[in-house]
Amino acid sequence: MSDTAKANACYDGGCTCRQVRYRLASKPLIVHCCHCSWCQRETGSAFALNAMIEADRVQLLQGEMEVIETPSQSGKGQRISRCPTCKIAVWSNYSGAGDAVRFVRVGTLDEPSRLPPDIHIFTTSKQPWVVLPAGTPAEAEYYRASERWSPESLERRATLQAKYPRRT
Ligand SMILES: [Zn+2]
Ligand SMILES: [Zn+2]
């Protein structure tokens, strides 16, 4: 497969018991590797890998999600979608972007190696034995999308913002 064809292809994934299956219709907006202590606790590991993508590009192929309200660092909470049977977390919505954007857990993809991190965030709380690659941007905490996202992703973001104006 050519690089272009690969970039345009879908990404399939699912839970451990295979009741839930989903497909990402395109590559994500960005892939975060988050080293914050909340992600460490939620994954039971050293970091979380989240592919941020428009909700309407995530197709549920099979099964239904169980949505669990979960505390988050912002205090506004996040909604974690889990398989109702094996309870594996497949994606989350944060209150900031609402239901328009999903944070898909890259480890639930059939081929997680296709979506390596575009950026490392919250590296101040990174485990000291995790050594970051030189070529990937890293931020002490969070960042501005306008400074880090690709032009294509910023265009997609503008479309999203037009579609879902923030309610205040
Ligand atoms: Zn399952
Ligand atoms: Zn985090």
Image (cartoon, rainbow, N blue to C red):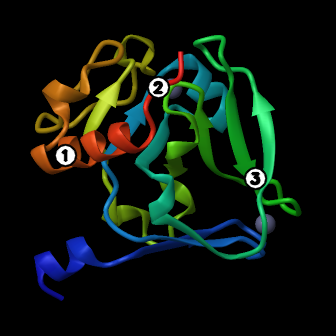
> Helix, strand, or loop for circle 1?
helix
Looking at the image, is mark 1 or mark 2 nearer the viewer? 2
Q: Amino acid at mark 3?
A: Arg
* Contact flag, marks 3 and 2 (Cβ < 8 Å): no
Q: Name above or below for residue 163 compared with residue 44.
A: below
Which of pointers 1 and 3 lies earlier in the amino acid sequence? 3
Q: Which mark is residue 166?
A: 2
Q: Nearer the viewer, residue 63 or 18?
A: 63
Q: Crowding near pointer 2: few (<14 within 10 Å), some, many (20+)?
A: few
- Please tell me whether residue 154 is drawn above or below residue 78 in the rendered image: below
Q: Residue at x 77, y 73 (%)?
A: 63
Above/below status of 5 relative to 42: below
Find numbered disc 3 in the image and state the secondary structure of the residue it sits on: strand
For disc 3, the marked residue is 82
What residue sits 13% from the left and 34% below the top?
A: 134
Q: Are marks 1 and 3 in contact (CB under 8 Å)?
A: no
Q: CA distance from mark 3 to mark 2?
A: 26 Å
Residue 139 in the image: state x and y as whole percent.
26, 19
User: Where is residue 64, by image quadrant?
Assistant: bottom right
Inspect this view and state whether residue 127 appears: yes
Image depth: mark 1 or mark 3 in front: 1
Front position in the image: 160 or 64: 160
106 shown above or below 109: above
Residue 12, image x and y in percent? 50, 74
Q: Which mark is residue 155?
A: 1
| Disc 1 residue type (three-letter) | Glu
Mark 3 or mark 2, whichever is nearer to me: 2
Amino acid on which disc 2 is placed: Arg
